């Protein structure tokens, strides 16, 4: 990567949800040209990009067609489910894939990144095993013990994930995982249930020509495997934080390239347990839209383009809380926005998703306050004021 890049660059974003939308806003602020791609029309990032393409990103030929048409300098994955073999080909042809084509291949499925961290790098993770049919799952669950957590190897935002308390629940977990699996995979991972004190995302910025840097840790609370609220800074013991940073550096060095990574850890009383990582901005990192001088999307962009990041300033206690849909609808409007914004130091992002389904994330409330508790309370209150109506 050259030291002084010329702008604008042509960026192709594969996945155009809420995270992509904020990334495009950051990219457009510096005048770049962005092609936003997703499986459906009018996705959030498409609404702010220069142009859009609707394709199946798991289909290599469709990826080839849009890459040939637009000739991007950078391909920037925003979701996991992409035909990563094709990205390797693009990289060989001189397009920069972020963070690298191999990294997207490793993180597309939970098993590859888990093997890399646990087997190749010797990093502490939850005990785990895999199964490709119900009989295998019954057998390996007994070895891992109960409670445990069953997840499709290919899914995100908790889709297909369940906690299994005893052997009688294994079959239901298998069916749920297969139904929630993305792509054509029939493989699940079963993990020892970790009774953590707090879980964190450590936003880790890997740069082309400068050392790896970190944001203050982000604490979060999840329900059914999906994020509900996040806050920054998360208060954890300095020794454990340094350990988490060292693990994040080790894994991201192994993956290579440049960009932001959301590295997820479970923190127990005296241990740091690596969970997984996103080679891109993280949903829990949306709190940085209010909590930092440079948010995670601006940091991703700067790292990708090799632009300097002289300082990351944490602006004090801040939180985010999600706004979820409860119904299927194709006509989305929001009420309660004025009420939500009436509080000081509160902001909202309404993503502009064209339709809803139960549990789909449609927006997020952001807040700053004098303590984490107050910031969490404020963000949650603001989120609860916003109602999705058809
Ligand atoms: N082994 C475990 N022990 C305890 N809790 C777990 C375990 N695995 C997952 N969880 C809980 O479920 C959440 C989601 O799990 P995970 O991050 O693996 O799923 P995901 O679908 O990749 O989510 P995302 O895409 O939002 O990061 C975790 O943040 C944690 O709260
Ligand atoms: N945990 C990963 C994550 O938060 N990804 C974000 O959600 C979008 C998909 O949302 P959708 O399922 O509502 O289309 C993705 O495009 C990305 O922005
Ligand atoms: Mg996760």
Image (tube, helix red, strand yellow):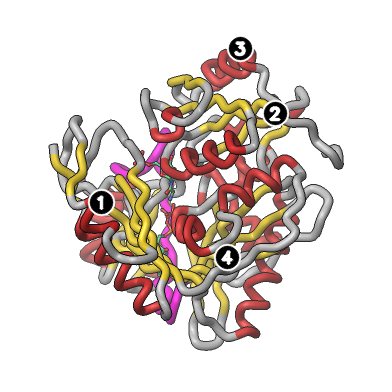
* Mark 4 to mark 1 CA distance (whole Å): 24 Å
Residue indicated by mark 4: 202
* Cβ of mark 4 under 8 A from ligand 3: no
Of the two numbered discs 4 and 2 in the rendering, the one whose residue sits closer to the viewer: 2
Task: Judge whether residue 220 is colored magenta.
Answer: no
* Mark 1 to mark 3 CA distance (whole Å): 36 Å
* Cβ of mark 3 under 8 A from ligand 2: no
Marks 3 and 2, the one that precedes in the sequence = 2
Residue 188 appears left or right of 262: left
- Density class for disc 1 (Cα within 10 Å; few <14, some 14-19, many ≥20) is many
Marks 1 and 3, the one that precedes in the sequence = 3
Magenta range: 178-199
Residue indicated by mark 1: 324
* Mark 3 to mark 2 CA distance (whole Å): 16 Å
Above-or-below relation of 127 to 351: below
Q: Where residue 109 sits in the image (x, y, percent)?
A: 52, 46
**Residue situated in front as seen by the camera: 46 or 102:** 46
Marks 2 and 1, the one that precedes in the sequence = 2
Residue 288 appears left or right of 358: right
Residue indicated by mark 2: 9
Q: Which mark is residue 69?
A: 3
**Residue situated in front as seen by the camera: 126 or 97:** 97
Q: Residue at x 25, y 51 (%)?
A: 324
Marks 3 and 4, the one that precedes in the sequence = 3
């Amino acid at each position: 990567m050259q030291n002084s890049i010329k702008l604008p660059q042509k960026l192709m974003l594969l996945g155009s949800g809420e995270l992509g939308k904020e990334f495009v806003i950051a990219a457009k602020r510096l005048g770049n040209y962005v092609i936003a791609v997703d499986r459906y029309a009018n996705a959030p990032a498409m609404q702010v990009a220069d142009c859009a393409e609707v394709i199946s990103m798991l289909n290599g030929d469709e990826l080839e067609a849009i890459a040939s048409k637009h000739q991007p300098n950078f391909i920037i994955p925003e979701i996991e489910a992409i035909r990563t073999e094709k990205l390797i080909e693009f990289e060989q042809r001189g397009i920069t894939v972020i963070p690298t084509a191999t990294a997207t291949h490793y993180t597309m499925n939970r098993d590859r990144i888990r093997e890399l961290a646990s087997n190749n790098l010797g990093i502490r993770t939850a005990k785990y095993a895999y199964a490709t049919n119900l009989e295998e799952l019954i057998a390996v669950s007994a070895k891992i013990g109960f409670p445990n957590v069953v997840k499709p190897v290919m899914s995100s935002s908790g889709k297909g994930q369940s906690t299994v308390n005893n052997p009688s629940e294994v079959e239901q977990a298998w069916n749920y995982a297969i139904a929630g699996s993305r792509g054509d995979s029939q493989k699940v991972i079963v993990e020892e249930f970790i009774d953590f004190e707090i879980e964190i995302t450590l936003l880790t910025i890997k740069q082309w020509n400068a050392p790896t840097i970190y944001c203050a840790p982000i604490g979060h609370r999840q329900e059914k495997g999906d994020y509900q609220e996040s806050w920054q800074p998360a208060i954890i013991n300095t020794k454990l934080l340094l350990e988490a940073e060292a693990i994040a550096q080790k894994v991201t060095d192994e993956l290579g390239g440049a960009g932001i990574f959301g590295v997820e850890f479970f923190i127990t009383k005296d241990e740091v347990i690596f969970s997984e990582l996103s080679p891109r901005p993280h949903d829990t990192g949306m709190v940085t839209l209010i909590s930092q001088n440079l948010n995670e999307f601006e940091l991703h962009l700067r790292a990708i383009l090799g632009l300097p990041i002289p300082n990351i300033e944490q602006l004090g206690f801040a939180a985010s809380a999600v706004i979820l849909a409860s119904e299927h609808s194709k006509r989305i409007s929001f009420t309660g926005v004025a009420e939500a914004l009436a509080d000081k130091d509160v902001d909202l992002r309404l993503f502009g998703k064209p339709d809803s389904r139960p549990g789909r994330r449609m927006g997020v409330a952001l807040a700053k306050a004098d303590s984490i508790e107050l910031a969490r309370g404020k963000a949650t209150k603001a989120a609860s004021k916003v109602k999705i109506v058809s």
